[in-house]
Amino acid sequence: MRVVHLSLSDFRNYERADVALMPGPNLFVGRNGQGKTNLVESLGYLSTLGSHRVSSDTAMIRQGANAAIVRCRIRHDERELLVEVQLNRAGANRAQVNRSAVKPRELPRYFSSVLFAPEDLSLIRGEPATRRRFADELLVQRNPRLAGVMADYDRVLKQRNTLLKSARSSGVKGDRLSTLDIWDERLVALGSEIIDARLDLIVRLSEPLRLAYRSVAGDDHHPLIHAVQSIYPESVPERWSSEDRASDPATPAPSQPAREVPVFGTTETASAFRDALVRLRPRELERGITLVGPHRDDLFFELNGLPTKGYASHGESWSFALALKLASAQLLRQNSATGDPVLILDDVFAELDQARRRMLAAAVQDYEQVLITAAVFDDVPEELTAHTVRIEAGAVIDE
């Protein structure tokens, strides 16, 4: 898969922009603050329905405009599609594929990309919500149906929390709250599928992560991913001390490595989820919030047997985050009916020394299309500069 043409209207600092893109590497060059990242951010949005920089869609709409439009012509083999999304300040966003209306959440079915940017260091050093979002975006790209499951889970969770808050304020006891049991069953059914899908993802990412880390770092530091699951009672594996755990003492410890490729919605997971809800109901009624489920889970990363958070150096953390994204791209290209995802490297080469620049260039050279942003042309290895687009003040000034 590759992007043939990108058109923006009122997106970030672009009143209008039209850019033709080529197979292989495409380099966007310009001083900081000119709009290079805005271009690739728009493509990232099409495949994940979110920005890697902000949580609000309205932040991507140009000041003074009521809506922003991202229009992208993509090609796979001899087939072309026109994919569009309109971000609105008021009202729901709208999407089209070949001029026919679709639900925005269906866009990942048609366009796939993997974007790495300096902000992704938060995958290693940031909060659990960042890692959950990383896992869930990748899950939806691999299986778009899960977007509906996650949306349904969020709705049920919101309703259950509303009921818990109401019970807390009225003093209703848990054993008299039969309505809660109904929401519990729905929460378990949806949440178990999400939990098992994440476990499946961890299993499948493990080997691509190891290979990707070696390709960008030049060493095998044994990168590993473990699931942190709130539905299981706390238990700390021997090789992790209590000091190595997350700063929030309520966060459960990493579970043992995931079992072999689990089946979605397994009885085992549902049973554990249901038991956890029963066990924690008094605390949930006291606090008015749901304390277990995939919305409370995390991913735990380690290098050389130690947690990356708090132990890995800046270079190791950077390499781990980059390897996660390269492993994601590798996973998406496996058994894909639409070919490679578009690989996007936003301001990456400035952080690397010459040796690692060459290693990264070698690692991405066989992707069908790679989009790169850089403030300094000479930071990028020559083999990635064949098609260079210069950006200045929200305008394409030279190709």
Image: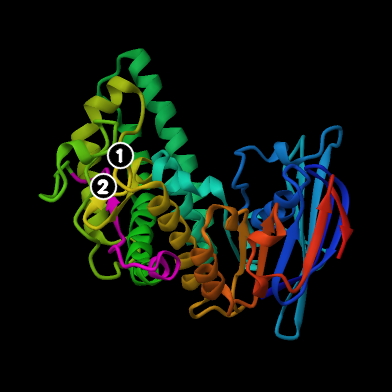
| Residue drawn at 28 percent across, 62 percent down | 266
Q: Are marks 2 and 1 in contact (CB under 8 Å)?
A: yes
Residue that extends furthest to the bottom in the rendered view of this protein = 78
**Quadrant of the rendering where the N terminus is positioned:** bottom right
Crowding at dot 2, Cα within 10 Å, few <14 / some 14-19 / many 20+, comes out as: many
Q: In x, y percent, where is residue 343?
A: 60, 66
Q: Earlier in the sequence, mark 2 or mark 1?
A: 2
The type of residue carrying mark 1 is Val
Is residue 241 shown left or right of residue 336? left
**Camera-side mark, 2 or 1:** 1
Residue that extends furthest to the top in the rendered view of this protein = 170
Q: In x, y percent, where is residue 172?
A: 29, 18
Q: In x, y percent, where is residue 167?
A: 35, 20
**Quadrant of the rendering where the C terminus is positioned:** bottom right
Residue 89 lies in quadrant: top right
Q: Which residues are magenta?
A: 212-232
| Residue drawn at 21 percent across, 43 percent down | 253
Q: Front-most of 151 and 5? A: 5
Q: Front-most of 5 and 287? A: 5
Query: Height in image: 392 above or below 399?
Result: above
229 inside magenta stretch: yes
The residue under label 2 is 273
Query: Height in image: 51 above or below 243?
Result: below
| Residue drawn at 34 percent across, 33 percent down | 290
The type of residue carrying mark 2 is Phe
Residue 259 lies in quadrant: bottom left
The residue under label 1 is 292
Cα distance between the residues tagged 2 and 1: 8 Å
- Under tag 2, what secondary structure? helix
